[in-house]
Each structure stands twice: as structure tokens, then as C-alpha cells.
Amino acid sequence: MLHVVLLLGCAVTIYLACEAFVNAVEWLGVRMKVGPVAVGTILAAAGTALPESVVTLVAVLYGGPSGKDIGVGAALGGPLVVGTLAYAVVGGMLLLRQRATRSLSGLPAAVPAGPVSGYDAGATADAADSARGPLDGTDMVGLARDQTWFLSIFVFKVALGVVAFSIKPWLGIVFLLAYGVYAMREIRGTGEHASAEGLEPLTFQKSRAVPTTFAVVAQTLVTLVVIFAASQLFVAQLDWAGPALGLPAVVVALLLSPVATELPEIMNAIIWVRQGKTSLALGNISGAMMIQATVPSALGLLFTPWKFDTPLLLAGVATLASVVYLLVLFRRDLVTPKRLLGAGGFYLAFAAALVVTLS
């Protein structure tokens, strides 16, 4: 019972800390004069991924053989969760917002296929136009570009897991350089800077219209520490839940633990969608995917043999399939909440394949 209470308490703590974190990071973007998209892709993503990267580093350096396995598992499990469940959560949140909006406006949950007595033609057209809801205006070209970057890096990453050669560890540096190039491109953006217009007052200085730089940085750091501590406690409870439920260690490592470690990114996305900032939510996920594809991979290549077994390869294939699916949606501007929700199907397919493989 205590473990269940701790799991719920950690989840609530992470959500509340993430609310304060996204509030701080938006002000941080204004202070640093970065592009509005970079607030999600770089600042928010780097902040929530930094603790995970530190944990991976400690695991591969000081965790012995089991620690190296955990580190490699995290390098595959993280992108799998972000590239499937995180997008599915955004899609689910957008569907909930659509239904709430239509309920308030008096429109039906589904638009009639043809003319219906009692319906205003203009209202029906507006309802049809709202099929994508808050996704309208989202930079699909930029999101497609991010998916292309991720796909090219991730294919290389998975390929390295099935071969062995003497200089393979040094290729970890290439992954770090790749992220550096991506980060610089995002920060430069189009020259547009994040605006303070419409931002909620900083939690640490609610009485000030424009918070001090010290307060912004302090709130960012404090919330990151809380997120990090709560996430690690959450993972510890999952370590208990696995054996208690009779689940093999590999199932916990690839199915449950990554969900816990990626919980801050998922919470950020939920908060931003709830606030009507879908572009920031999707940008945060794209940025988190780029970090997960490069930094943990670099650590794994530098400090482990980086050899994949069947479960790891399955995780890689499921991630690649989901990213290809998302890339097609973004490139062809076919994204809808329901189609984003469909990305979660790749995670379920991986879970089923993993169970069959281990049985």
C-alpha cells in the first residue's frame, strides 16, 4: 500500500513541479531572447532530460555490468516512450479540449456528413475547420524537420548496436556534436524572440509583472531538483512493482521505467496543451526526442559495449516505425488529434511483441 501511495504522490508532485517549471522556462526564454519554438525544443527539453542523462552517466560509470545494461536500456526506452506515448498523450489532450469546446459552443461531438435541419451552414463549416483544433497554426514543416533529424540519427544508433569494431566507442562524440548542431539551429531560429505577452506571472514573484532574472533562474533550478527527486523515487517504486507483479527485469527496464523517467516531458506536454500552447508541447517532445537520441547514446557508446539483444532491437524497430508514421503526418500536413493518439499503438505493439518474445 505504501508503494502505491508513493507512486501517486510522486506523480502529483511531478505534475505540480512541471507547472512551475514551464512557467519559469517560458520567462527564461524571454530573458535569453531565444526563439519561441526553442523554449520547448531546447530549454524545456534540456532541463527535464538533464537529470536523466546524469542518472545514465552514473549507471554506466559506476553501476557495474547491470548498470551498463540499465544505461543502454534507457537509451532505447526513452526515445520509445517519447516517440509514442508522449505524442499519444498530446492527441488525447487535444481531443478532450475539442469536446469541451464543442460542448460549450453547443456543437455536436461529430460534424454531420451532410446538410441537417437546424444546423447553421457557417457553424457546421467552423466545426469542420476545428477538426484539427489547436493544431492549426502549428509549424508542421519544423516538426517534420525535427523528425527527419531524429530518424537519421536513430537509424545510425540502432545500426551500431548490431555491429562491433574498434573505433565504435569514439562515435559517441559524433552524437554529442549532432545535438550541438541541432541546438544551435533551434536557438537561432528565424530571428524571432520569445515574447512575454500573455505569460502568467512567475510563481516565485506573482506580484511583479516582469520577474527578476534571479527569480526566474531560481524557480527553474528548484523545480528541476524537485522533478529529478520525485522521478527517481517514482522509478524506485516501479523497481518494487516489477517483482511484485511477477514481471521480468527487462519488461520493467523497457516498458515501465522509461515511462517514469519521461514523465516530466509528458507532464509538460499536458500542461502546455491545457494552456492552449500546442506548439510548445509538440516542440518539447521533439526536443526531448533529439536529446534522447544523442546524449544517452553517446554515453552508452563511450562506456558500454553497445550491443543490442532482441528486446532492445524490438524497442528500436517500434520507435523507428512510430517516427516514420509521424514524419508522414507532419510532412503531408495530415496531423489530427486522433492520428497523434494513434502513435501510442506502436508502444502497445512493442509491449505485445516483448511479451511474446519472453514467453
Image (tube, rainbow, N blue to C red):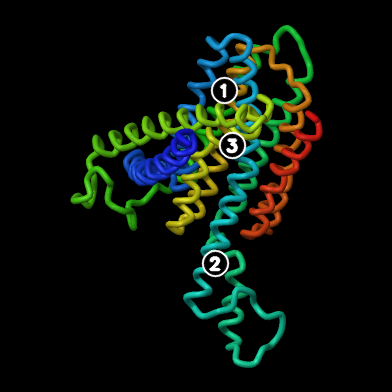
Q: Which residue occupies 36% across, 51% down? A: 195
Rounded to the nearest angstrom, the CA distance separating label 3 from label 2 is 26 Å
| Residue positioned 29% across, 39% down in the render | 216
Q: Is residue 258 left or right of residue 10?
A: right
Give the amino acid type for the residue marked by disc 3 in the picture: Met
| 226 left or right of 261 in image | left
Question: Residue 6 location, x and y as percent?
Answer: 44, 35
- Where residue 293 appears, as percent x and y from the top left, is 62, 30
Residue matched to label 3:
289
Q: Secondary structure at mark 2?
A: helix
Q: CA distance from mark 1 to mark 2?
A: 40 Å
Amino acid type, residue under disc 1 in the picture: Leu
Compare residues 109 and 293 and report the one nearer the observer. 109
Q: Give the number of the disc on residue 176.
A: 1
Give the residue drawn at x 64%, y 12%: 304
Name the residue tied to disc 2: 98
Give the x, y percent position of residue 81.
Answer: 62, 38
User: Which comes sooner in the sequence, label 3 or label 2?
Assistant: 2
